[in-house]
Structures are given as C-alpha cells and as structure tokens.
C-alpha cells in the first residue's frame, strides 16, 4: 500500500500551484507577462497563456534568449515570468541569469519546473539536481523551493508581489503530498516550523518535507523527538531558525532532492558553522547523475525515502555531544 | 534508383521500427513516439545502406558516427540498433524502466552498444558532431563520416547556429546534418511557435550545402545521402520533409503525440494499422 494513504494527503503536482498563481496574478498585475520555451503545458504556464494569449510570448526552444528577453521586458517595466524545466533554466541559461538578470537586478521571475527526480522515466538529462547550487550563489537572487502545490502558489505570488528583483522558484512534476493549505503561513525568508521537537532537527525542502514528516513518525516511535523545518526560502536563508534549531536540538539533518554538494545542506551548514556548530548530516543525491525509473523507485534507490531519512537521523542523533 | 527488392526490404524494416516504437512506448507508459515515427525511413536507409559500421563490433575504429541530436527520438534509434543486431531485441521492452540500458534519452554511461554519446538537451548533439568531424578531418586523417539528426524545433537553439557556423568555417565535408522537418514541436507548429524558415537559405548562408529530400521516400533519401558524399569543402544538410507521427493515423501531424505513449486501445489500433497482429503487442513481455 502507498504510504501516503495513511495520511489524508491529496497528491497534487507542485507545478499546478505555479500555473494557478500566474492566472491569479494576471488579474491584479496587467504588467505581468509570461515567457515559455516550448514546454508551456508541462510547466503549467498554459493556465496563463490560454487565458491571456496577448501577454504570453513563446521563445521557442531557446532558453538563453528567453532569459535575455525577460530581462529586456523587465527593463521596460513589465514583470516577466519565464518558465521551463530546471535543467534548461538554471543550466542552459545560467550566464544570462547571472550577468543579464542578476547583475542588473532585473525584475525577472523564473519558474524552474521538473526539479529533482520527479521527471522519472525521462532520465538523467531531464532530472534537475543542481539548481539550488547554481542559483543560490547568485547575488540579488531569491530562491524558493516550495514543498507542495499550495506553497508553490504562494511562493509565486510572493515572487511577483513582494520582491522587486530576480526570483527562482523550483518545483516538481510528479504529484506530491499536499501538506499545506490556504491558511498555512508563507513568509519570504522565514522558515516554516512544521512541527517542534527536542532531539534532532530535520531541515527539508520541496517534496522532501513530506518524506521527512513520514520519517519523523518512525523516529518518534523510537522515542526520538523531531523538529521539522520546511526551508521554502533557500536564499536568503533563515539564519535565526537554523541557529535556534542547533541550540535547541543539538543536531541537524538536511534533506533535499538535489546533489549533496552546494544545495540546501551546504546552505544550512554555512550558517551552522558560523553560529552554533552541532553535528550535521545530509540526505541528498550522492554526487551522481539520475536515471530512468518511476520517481518513487528513484527516491528509494537514491536513499531519499522516509526510511533512509529515519536511518540517517538515528545515526546522527547518536553523534550528539 | 533502388530496386524493388531493396525498396521492399527497407519498407519492411521501417514498418518494424514503427511497430517497435509503439510497443516500447506502450509498455514504458511514456516516451516520444511522434518524432520517432518521423525518422523511421531516415534511420533505415542510413543504417542499412550508407553507414560504415559493425554491429558486432560497436567500437570498430573505422566506423561512421551517428549522433542523435534530437535525443528524445531514441525509441526509433533503439529499434534500428536492435534491428541491426547491436543488442538483443527483447531488451527493447525495458525502455525507460528502472535499471534499463534504454534510458529515456540516450545515455552513454549505460553502455547500450551503438550509443555514441548522451543527448537529450536539445542543440548539443550538433556541436558534438562538429567536434568529431573536426577531429576526423583536421587531426586524425580519418575518412569516416559523421551523421547527426536534428529536429526542426531543435534548430531554434542558438547553439545550433554556432555549431553550423563552425562546421562551415572548418569546411567539414565529412559532416552530414539531417534536419527532420516535420513542422511540429511541443507547443504546436514550428512556424507558429518560433519560425525557423527559410532553413534552406539559412544553411546556404552559413556555408553549408543544403539538399531537400522527401523524408519518407527511400529513393529520395538515398539520392540525398549519395549526393552528400560527393560534396567537397563544405558540410551537407539534408532537409528531410517528414510527417510527425508518420504511419499511425491518429498520430500524424498531431503535436499532442510528441511525448505521450498510446494507451492500450490506441496501441492495438497502431499495431493493426502497421499490419501486425494484436497479439504482437504483448509477445515476449515479462509480466
Ligand atoms: C534544451 C532543451 N530544451 C527543451 C527541451 C524539451 N523538449 C524535448 S523535445 C522538444 C521539442 C522538439 O521539437 P523538434 O526538435 O521539432 O523535435 P520533433 O518534433 O522532431 O520530435 C522540447 C522542447 C529539451 N529536451 N532540451
């Protein structure tokens, strides 16, 4: 049986939240325009393009130009949202994002779809496992990695309404558990405490937040009390929440559907070593490329599933001073 | 002109490739049938008439190289490789499954014989092909050719034109780029999404020798490949007029069949349209 069925979690792809936000924003912001790159339906930008064809521009299969055009549109006062798969957004158009968008602090929003292993059978070429590392090193950038459909909607709205400058929103393809609802708070740069606990903190992002909740249920059965943080904003990162967690629980495990180097784990460790060093460990893709398979098969093989998280958490809690 | 025997042989192979693509993607539950169907004849005439290769010796030093720049069309490539004997046919039905050598996009690291390099991020294969051709012509004194297949949507990528420029600049007459001109990409018609035409004139302007061929007509393709071998001093592009989803009535010219597998009912319909018995769809499938 599917483990998610034990909860009454609805399974919805995060990308839907991106599409919903675009149509919602369109009404309030006539200056909002959307740029596609021949993946309009996949990224859910089609929710917008079908309703507002005059404010939608398809760049074709030309991500570098799309990023540059978005910057140009921003310079004329528009709020351009450019979306494609994460590998092609953060990867293919990296220099354009760095030098054209970020250096000029252009008000461009980037929807990085199909983050993580969630494209499954498409394999390594399409599985985006590097964007957090690539994007979080860029000055002026804000990076959101929302946990589910609703949080993706909120992140997209915040990107447009609260931030004047570049924002990257990383979201996935496959249906994932809906763990937040409309009433769940979302504050830019402020970690969301999913639950409090005493013995260890798990800091996760994206679909790994739900996986971490499942892991915590196993751990609590063993008497390990777990604090869980949904780090939906990786840049700027919530230093206060990280330091507080280190002091309170004395150990931090990070969990992400991303390469182990340079991602959420690295971002958290950078704060931990400078504030209140405690033992840490990382659940992440261990310095390898992805491969074809169903997303859940891959999550297991790459040891990102709740059982692997629980195992690592148990080992880590033993290392506590 | 190809004789009737040849024509019959090639048609039979192309028909089987189409069947294999349907069976593979159906059992995978995902994949890219549309752009695979459009290159069935191109791959057939290339692998069974023009290519210097040894399926039993995939790393044979004197082989021509094939780079599938539009990597998503790999089901067709996997089918032609199995047909040529590079690997056992039964392995085809593992397409896109966990642990398979037949990845969703061609993967060098999985070691499927006949795969020269990993592709799938559009626009990159052509540069690789230019690099190999450059090495053969200007460094290795190797007289082998490099063939690469691009989509007409793919050539919207700026990198493609950088590669075209380089190939013209270095006079790579050992390079043949086949453009699968099926007029469709994912979001619709190429001319609506981001017009790439006129391709012929652009290629000329980039110092290439363009040839237009009927992409589902073996004689036309054969002439183009023959002609390509005669051209000296410049790279050749074969602009192949094709139909996306060719051979399956409900797929032809429908963008929606770019990256979607047929369900059971439609897979059976396709199999029958191709002249195979319905039972062939499930034959040799491990349950
Ligand atoms: C760099 C890059 N951007 C986007 C994609 C997603 N994608 C895969 S196939 C495709 C459309 C390709 O169209 P075309 O080249 O005409 O291929 P065909 O229609 O022959 O299948 C797109 C946009 C990709 N694989 N690589």
Image: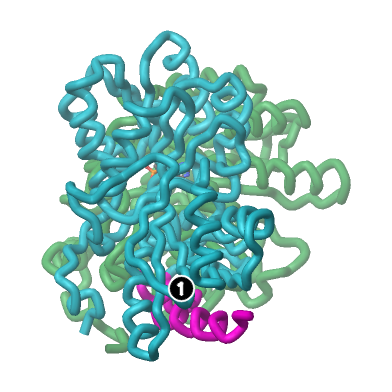
Write down the quadrant of residue B6 in the picture: bottom left
Judge by depth and name the residue closer to the eye, B166 or A106.
A106
- Rendered position, A218 above or below B248: below
Residue A37 forms part of the magenta stretch: no
Describe the element under mark 1 as helix, strand or loop. loop
Q: Residues within 10 Å of mark 1 (few under 14, many from 20)?
A: many
**What colour denotes chain A?**
cyan
Which stretch did the figure color magenta?
A: A293-321
Predominant SS along the magenta part = helix
Judge by depth and name the residue closer to the eye, A105 or B90.
A105
- Rendered position, A165 above or below A299: above
Total label count? 1
Whether the residue carrying mark 1 lies under 8 Å from ligand 1 is answered with no
- Rendered position, B71 above or below B195: below
Write down the quadrant of residue B169 in the picture: top right
Q: Position of residue B46 (x, y in %)?
A: 53, 54
Which quarter of the rendering shows the C terminus of chain A?
Answer: bottom right
Residue A73 is at least partly visible in this image: yes
């Amino acid at each position: 049986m599917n483990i998610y069925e034990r909860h009454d979690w609805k399974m919805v792809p995060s990308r839907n939240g991106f599409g919903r936000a675009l149509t919602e924003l369109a009404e309030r912001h006539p200056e909002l325009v959307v740029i596609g790159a021949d993946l309009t339906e996949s990224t859910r930008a089609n929710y917008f393009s079908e309703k507002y064809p005059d404010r939608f521009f398809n760049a074709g299969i030309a991500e570098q130009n799309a990023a540059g055009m978005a910057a140009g549109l921003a310079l004329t006062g528009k709020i351009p949202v450019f979306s494609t798969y994460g590998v092609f957004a953060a990867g293919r158009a990296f220099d354009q994002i760095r030098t054209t968008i970020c250096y000029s602090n252009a008000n461009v929003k980037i929807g990085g779809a199909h983050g993580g292993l969630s494209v499954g059978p498409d394999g390594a070429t399409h599985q985006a496992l590097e964007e957090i590392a690539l994007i979080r090193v860029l000055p002026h950038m804000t990076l959101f990695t929302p946990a589910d459909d609703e949080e993706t909607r909120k992140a997209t709205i915040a990107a447009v309404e609260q931030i004047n400058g570049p924002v990257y929103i990383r979201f996935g393809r496959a249906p994932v558990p809906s763990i937040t609802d409309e009433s769940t708070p979302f504050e830019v740069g402020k970690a969301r405490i999913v639950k409090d606990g005493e013995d260890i903190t798990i800091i996760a992002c994206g679909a790994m937040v739900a996986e971490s909740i499942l892991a915590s249920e196993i751990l609590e059965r063993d008497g390990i009390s777990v604090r869980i943080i949904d780090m939906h904003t990786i840049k700027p990162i919530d230093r206060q929440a990280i330091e507080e967690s280190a002091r309170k629980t004395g150990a931090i495990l990070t969990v992400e559907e991303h390469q182990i180097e340079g991602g959420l784990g690295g971002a958290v460790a950078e704060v931990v070593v400078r504030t209140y060093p405690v033992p840490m460990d990382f659940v992440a893709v261990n310095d390898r490329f992805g491969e074809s398979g169903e997303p859940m098969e891959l999550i297991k093989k790459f040891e990102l599933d709740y059982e692997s998280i629980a195992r690592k958490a148990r080992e880590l809690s033993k290392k506590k001073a | 002109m190809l004789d009737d025997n040849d024509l019959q042989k090639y048609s039979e192979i192309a028909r089987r490739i189409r069947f294999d693509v349907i069976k593979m993607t159906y059992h995978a539950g995902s994949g890219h049938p549309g752009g695979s169907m459009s290159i069935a004849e191109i791959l057939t005439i290339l692998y069974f008439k023009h290519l210097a290769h040894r399926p039993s010796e995939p790393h044979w030093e004197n082989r021509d190289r094939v780079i599938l720049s539009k990597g998503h069309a790999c089901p067709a490539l996997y089918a032609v490789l199995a047909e040529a004997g590079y690997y056992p046919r039964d392995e085809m039905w593992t397409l896109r499954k966990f642990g398979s050598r037949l990845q969703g996009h061609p993967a060098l690291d999985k070691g499927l014989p006949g795969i020269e390099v990993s592709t799938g991020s559009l626009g990159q294969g052509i540069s690789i092909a230019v690099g190999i051709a450059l090495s053969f012509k200007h460094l290795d004194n190797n007289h082998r050719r490099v063939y690469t297949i691009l989509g007409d949507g793919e050539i919207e990528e700026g990198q493609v034109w950088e590669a075209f420029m380089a190939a013209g600049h270095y006079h790579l007459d050992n390079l043949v780029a086949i453009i699968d001109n099926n007029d469709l990409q994912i979001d619709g018609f190429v001319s609506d999404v981001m017009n790439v035409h006129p391709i012929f004139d652009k290629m000329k302007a980039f110092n290439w020798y363009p040839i237009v061929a009927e992409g589902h007509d073996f004689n036309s393709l054969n002439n183009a490949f023959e002609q390509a071998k005669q051209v000296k001093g410049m790279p050749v592009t074969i602009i192949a007029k094709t139909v996306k989803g060719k051979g399956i009535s409900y797929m032809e010219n429908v963008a929606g069949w770019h990256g979607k597998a047929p369900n059971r009912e439609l897979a059976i319909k396709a199999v029958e349209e191709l002249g195979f018995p319905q039972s062939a769809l499930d034959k040799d499938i491990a349950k």
